[in-house]
Amino acid sequence: MIVRQTPNTLKIFFALRGSIVPKIYPQIFLVIIISTVIALIQYWSPSTFPAYGTIPFTLLGVALSLFLGFRNNASYQRWWEARTLWGQLVYDARSFTRQVLSFINTETETERDIQRSMIHLTIAFTHAVRHRLRDTEPWQDVERFVAPAHHDSMRQAKNLPNYLMGLLGQKLGDARRLGLTSEQMIQNMDERLHSMTVVLAACERIHSTPLPFAYMLLVHRTTYLYCIMLPFGLVSSLGWITPLICVVTAYTFFGLDALSEELEDPFGFAPNQLPLTALSRTIEINLLEAMGETELPPDIAPKNSYLE
């Protein structure tokens, strides 16, 4: 995710970090070449291209804008829903930890172990959710918070976050059987676990259900056709200005198309996707600090205005 102070107008105009330009520059160069060649042909042979009316391009441009706007809105809604879900996960993890620390007895070493393992499993669950959504290896972040007795079975689990949630449920059941807290608090803590499970399922839904491919293909093809056909309709009236107008139009339409595709899956490593590493590290620091730990991992800081 791009994190930067509000730049001035000049910096905004030339900013590339976080911009969609690096993804669409081949399409922009293609439009530049086509429109320049057409402008040269029109200059040397003015009768080559007849004076087409701009009404067809206006109608097609309006329709394409509506399609791109709808897809962009749908992609942004997925991005914002994902960010809301991770905000809920932060809230649930903190609330669950507060309940564990406040309402579970810690008079014996066994009781303290149960309390500590429940918080560690919550941290492991957070890291596991991030790695599942990014399809990366989770073991370095997860195994240090899980008892070695569970490592083998954990590596065989098809859904690691769900497996860790099962371990959390078992620990909560142990606390209930040992009478470490009241039935009311057991129910309240179970509601927090239920909420974290809902967050996992909702994130998996976003990750595994992209926007319909046929709709994406229609918008993609129409964008190419419109930007390639546009110089033929403008060159007779605009002449040498045609490449400039076509490039600005191509940047707008191809940029919206590429940005929508990037936001469609908000869990990746692209500059405009969510900073899941920073969010999960924040949860880890908050929960360890709540336990009284003093050796805390550092915050994830932006590198070149990019927060991972």
Image (tube, rainbow, N blue to C red):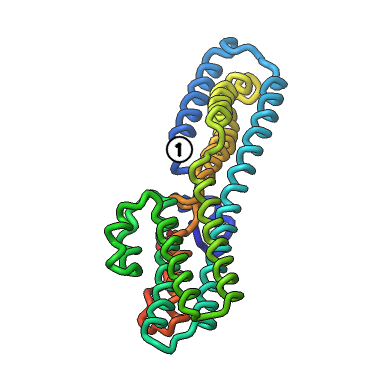
Which element type, helix, strand or loop, lies under badge 1?
Answer: helix
**Of residues 4 and 125, which is closer to you in this image?**
125
Q: Amino acid at mark 1?
A: Tyr
Residue at 41% across, 64% down: 167
Q: Please tell me whether residue 170 is drawn above or below residue 292 in the rendered image.
A: above
Residue 180 spot, x, y in % from top left: 49, 81
Instruction: Give the image quarter of residue 146.
Output: bottom left
Horizontal side of 160 relative to 4 (left or right) equals left
**Of residues 76 and 133, which is closer to you in this image?**
133
Residue at 55% across, 53% down: 82
Residue 192 spot, x, y in % from top left: 56, 67
Residue 29 spot, x, y in % from top left: 45, 32
Instruction: Give the image quarter of residue 126.
Output: bottom left
Residue at 54% across, 60% down: 86
Which residue is under mark 1? 25
Question: Callout 1 environment at 10 Å: few (<14), some (14 to 19), or many (20+)?
Answer: some
| Residue 33, visible in the rendered structure | yes
The C terminus sits in image quarter? bottom left
Horizontal side of 4 relative to 134 (left or right) equals right
Residue 141 spot, x, y in % from top left: 34, 64
